[in-house]
Image (cartoon, rainbow, N blue to C red):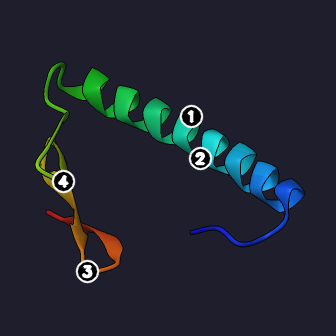
Amino acid sequence: MFTGSADELRRKEREAAVIGEQLAELLNKLDTLTPGSVTAHNGRITGPAFTVRRIRDRWSLTS
């Protein structure tokens, strides 16, 4: 749970929104390489020749 100030929370939310926007843009770029190839399910994002998955407390890429 977040315990900082309200201003800090808003700043972190704005930063998270920007990162989310960048992530969506990258996933769309990947999908243009092979349309329909990028999927998300069971805590994994898969695409042509890669899988991103959560391992412990980090996201990791496997090829």
Q: Which mark sits nearer the N-terminus, 4 or 3?
A: 4
As helix, strand or loop, the secondary structure at mark 1 comes to helix
Q: Tell me the crowding category of disc 4: few under 14, some 14 to 19, or many 20 or more residues within 10 angstroms, Cα based.
A: few
Q: Tell me the crowding category of disc 3: few under 14, some 14 to 19, or many 20 or more residues within 10 angstroms, Cα based.
A: few
Residue 21 lies, in percent from the top left, at 56, 34
As helix, strand or loop, the secondary structure at mark 3 comes to loop
Residue 52 lies, in percent from the top left, at 23, 58
Q: Which mark sits nearer the N-terminus, 2 or 3?
A: 2
Tell me the kind of residue under disc 2: Ile
Marks 1,2: beta carbons within 8 A: yes
Residue indicated by mark 4: 43
Q: Distance between the residues labelled 4 and 3?
A: 12 Å
Q: Which residue is drawn at 16% across and 55% down?
A: 51
Q: Which mark sits nearer the N-terminus, 2 or 4?
A: 2
Residue indicated by mark 3: 56
Taking 62 as reference, is 6 left or right?
Answer: right
Please tell me in which quadrant of the rendered image residue 39 appears: top left
Please tell me in which quadrant of the rendered image residue 38 appears: top left
Residue indicated by mark 2: 19
Q: Which mark sits nearer the N-terminus, 4 or 1?
A: 1
Taking 21 as reference, is 41 left or right?
Answer: left
Q: Residue at x 13, y 29 (%)?
A: 37
Q: Residue at x 85, y 65 (%)?
A: 5
Q: Which mark sits nearer the N-terminus, 3 or 1?
A: 1
Residue 40 lies, in percent from the top left, at 19, 39
Taking 7 as reference, is 3 left or right?
Answer: left
Between 2 and 55, the one nearer to me in the picture: 2
